Amino acid sequence: MYKSSNYNYFVPYNGKMLYHNSLRRSSFLMTVAEHQKMKALFEDPISFSLEYPSVFGQFYRWGFFVDAYTNELAVFRYLYNRDVVFSSDYHLVFANTSDQQFSSASIEPVAKYIKQKLDEKEMKSLCMEWRGPNVLDSFESFIRPLFFKVKKLCEKAGVESTAQIEVSMSNNAVIHNKLYHSKGVPTYIQTMQAVRNIILQYSGYHLRLHVNTHPCEKSEKERFMKQFDDISSKRIHWVWEPNEKLKNEAAQTNDAAFYRNLLKENHEQINPDVTIVLMAPRKNASIICPDWKVYMSVPQHVLQETEPEGTLNETDGTINWDEAAREKRLSQLWYEHKKCTDCPHLPLFVGICPLLTINIGQVCPIDNKFVDPETVIIKEFEAKQK
C-alpha cells in the first residue's frame, strides 16, 4: 500500500512543470503534456505501482510516494537532526554588535580556537561568516587576514573552508543613508564599492546581501541588481526583505511622501541593528561576539539580554561551554508545535522558518508573505543546474 508524499510540489517553470519533493530534495522537469498524464497516476498510487512498476519505483525512490504507514514527520525529524543539528560541518559566525566590532587584535585568539578544532579531526568542513552592523569596515583589519590564516590551517589539515560576509542595505540610497550609517556618515556609495571590490578582487568570498526594498516591485529589484551585472552574481546570495504593509502604502502616495513616512514611523521595524536570527541551533556551531561571549543561536538584537552558552578565552583560544545551557538550546527545536508540524512546507523552509519564528514570536513567513514556496523551489532547482 502506498500514498503520495505530503511534500510534493508541481510548479510551472519556463513552459514546463517542475516536480519537487521537499523532504528528499528531489526535482526534475516534465512537459505539460507529460504532467497531464501523470496527474491521473498520482491520484491512484496502487494502480500506478501495478501498471508501471519501473516508473513508479523511480518516483518512490525520489520520495514522491511512500509506504502507507510512513510517518513523514518522523523522517523529517531524523533528517533535520542528521543534516542540521548534528552535522559535522562546522559553522563559525563572527557577529559585530552595535556597540563593538572585531579588530586585528581578535585574530590570534580565534585562530587558536580553530586550530584546536582542526586538531580534534572531527571537522569535515568549515564555514566562516561575518555578520552585524558595519561588517564591511573590518574587512581589511579582521576578515581578510583571519580567513587567509585559517585557510592555510585548513589546507594543512585537509579540511575545506569557505567564507561568507552578510551585508544589509537598502536598494534606495536615501533610505540606506538614514538607516545604515556609521556615526551619522552616509554609507550607500561606500557599501556598493566595498561589495564590488570584494567580488572583483577576492575570489574566496561569498556575500549574502540582505536588501530592504520599499516598495518591493520587480522593476526595483532588477534596477538594483543591474549594478552588479558586470561582476560574478553567482557569488551573491540575494535576500529580499519586502514589507507588504509599506508596499501597499507606497501605492497610495508618491515616493517622497512614502519615504518620509517610512523613515518617520517605521524606523524601528527596519533598524539595521535589529537583524534576523543568526542560525538555527546546531551542535557544531559557534556565534562569537567581540566581547568573546559565544552563543549557539540567538537573535542579534537580544544579545545583551541573553545569557551566552560559552566564553572564549583570549589567552589560549579555548571555549568554556556551559553544557547544561547547550543541551537546553539543542532540545528546543523550532518546529515542534502544531502549526509547523502540520505545514506541508516544513522541509522546504528549514533555512527560513527558524529565522522568523525564533526571532519575532512565531510569525509564519508564508502567512505574512515573507517568502513564496514556489519561488524557493525554483531557486533551489536553478542552483542545482549551475
Image (tube, grey):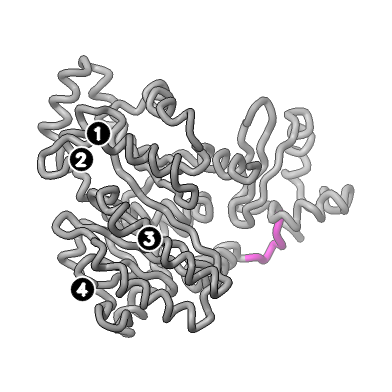
**66 falls in the magenta region:** yes
The reply to whether callout 4 and callout 1 are in contact (CB within 8 Å) is: no
- 273 in relation to 1, above or below: above
The reply to whether callout 2 and callout 1 are in contact (CB within 8 Å) is: yes
Residue 307: mark in rendering: 4
How far across and down, in percent of the image, does residue 299 sit?
27, 59
Query: First in sequence: mark 2 or mark 1?
Result: 2
How far across and down, in percent of the image, does residue 216 sit?
34, 28
| Residue labelled with disc 2 | 180
The reply to whether callout 3 and callout 1 are in contact (CB within 8 Å) is: no
- Judged by depth in the image, the label closer to the viewer, 3 or 1, is 1
Cα–Cα gap, marks 2 and 1: 8 Å
| Residue labelled with disc 1 | 188
Residue type marked 1: Tyr
Residue type marked 4: Glu
Res 369 visible: no
Which element carries disc 1, helix, strand or loop?
Answer: helix
